[in-house]
Each structure stands twice: as C-alpha cells, then as structure tokens.
Amino acid sequence: MKTLLVMGLALGLANVTRAGDPYVAAMNQAHRAVNATEAASQRTDDSLSQPQTAPPAQPAPQPMDPVLAATLQNIASLKTDLASLSTNTPPAAALTNDLMAAATGTKPSADTIGKLAGDLQTAVAGNPGLKVYYPKLAQYLHAAANGAHLTPAQFQTISDDLQQILENGGASYEAATYVANDLKALDRETK
C-alpha cells in the first residue's frame, strides 16, 4: 500500500517537471489507475470488516383448505377410477364409492350412483381416445354430484360438455346420452 502511494507521488512529481513530455498523458493515466485500485482495495477491506446479514426469512406457506384438499383428492380418485374401467367387469366399487363421496351435501341414492357408474363404464370402456379427457370428466362428475351448488345453466353446461366429450372420445351417442340422463337424475336428487 505504501509502495503504491510512493509510486503515485513520484508520478505526480514527474508530471510537474515533464509537462511538455509526450509521456505525461500515459503517466497521468497510470496515476489514475493506481488511485482507482487503492479505492477498490479500501472498499473491499471495509466490506470484509462489516458483519454479514442473513437473508430475510421466507414466510411459512399457508396450509391448504381441508375442503379444497378433499375435493382435489376426490377428483384425482375419480380420474383413476375412469382409467380402471373395463368391459369385462361390473363397475368398480371404487368408482361407485368415489361418486358417492363426491357429493358433499345431500347424497344421491345408491341406485342412481350405481346406474351412473354402469353407464360410465359402457361409455368409457374400449375407448382409448377418452384417456386425455379423464381429468375433465372427473371434474364434471364431481361438480354434478354437488348440483345443489350449481345454477341450472351451470349444470346444463356440465351435462352438455360431458356428453360431447364422451362422443368425441369414441363413445356412442346412446351411451353418452345415458350418462347425461344419469347426471340429470343425480342433480334432481342432490338439490
């Protein structure tokens, strides 16, 4: 550090004696570089001596609403149930149970749920094109089971969309219509 200071003073003195020399500009530039290096060194020394502060703590994540968690779990279960349907077995007990569990208010009758499960199996089984629609179908089934929370226009939209999805995925018009009619019966029972 003292060496740099002595060098800077020597350059300054040389500037006074050699004002007409072509190397004066180069020496002035060297002097400015020495000063800049010393200033940077001083800032670094000062920052090392200051205590480091910890980053601010992140706020704790909010816990998920239990009703929302149950809804999301039921929709995921319905999606899994749709994927497991096959033509050689009666409707899976899991589908029937999950359809019944979807209703959070007034529960539909076991007969209505059983008919819906059977008609869903007929519409879904053997139609691999429906696989991409399982998440949406599961959402619609959950919503339809809670028809008391829907306006008539909302329910009609769900019923129409579900029927269209089934037909687009390869289900016959008749099979899709049976499912749509089952949804209407479910709606009447849950109001």
Image (tube, rainbow, N blue to C red):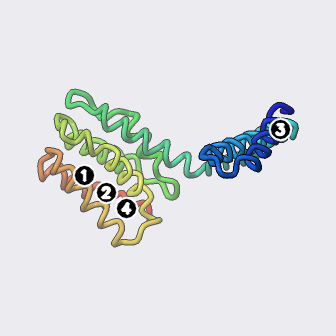
Q: Are marks 4 and 2 in contact (CB under 8 Å)?
A: yes
Q: Are marks 1 and 4 in contact (CB under 8 Å)?
A: no
Query: Mark 4 — residue?
Result: 187
Residue 74 drawn at (x, y percent):
47, 44
The answer to whether 51 appears left or right of 71 in the picture is right
Say which element carries label 3: helix
Query: Mark 1 — residue?
Result: 179
The answer to whether 22 appears left or right of 96 in the picture is right
Residues at marks 3 and 4, CA–CA distance in whole angstroms:
90 Å
The answer to whether 61 appears left or right of 81 in the picture is right
Query: Mark 3 — residue?
Result: 5
The residue lying toward the viewer, choosing from 101 and 24, is: 24
Say which element carries label 2: helix
Identify the image quadrant of the N terminus: top right
Disc 3 residue crowd, few under 14, some 14–19, many 20+, Cα 10 Å: some
Disc 1 residue crowd, few under 14, some 14–19, many 20+, Cα 10 Å: many
Identify the image quadrant of the C terminus: bottom left
Query: Mark 2 — residue?
Result: 183
Residue at left offset 83%, top offset 37%: 45
Q: Nearer the viewer, mark 3 or mark 2?
A: 3
Disc 4 residue crowd, few under 14, some 14–19, many 20+, Cα 10 Å: many
Residues at marks 4 and 2, CA–CA distance in whole angstroms:
6 Å
Say which element carries label 1: helix
Disc 2 residue crowd, few under 14, some 14–19, many 20+, Cα 10 Å: many
Q: Nearer the viewer, mark 3 or mark 4?
A: 3
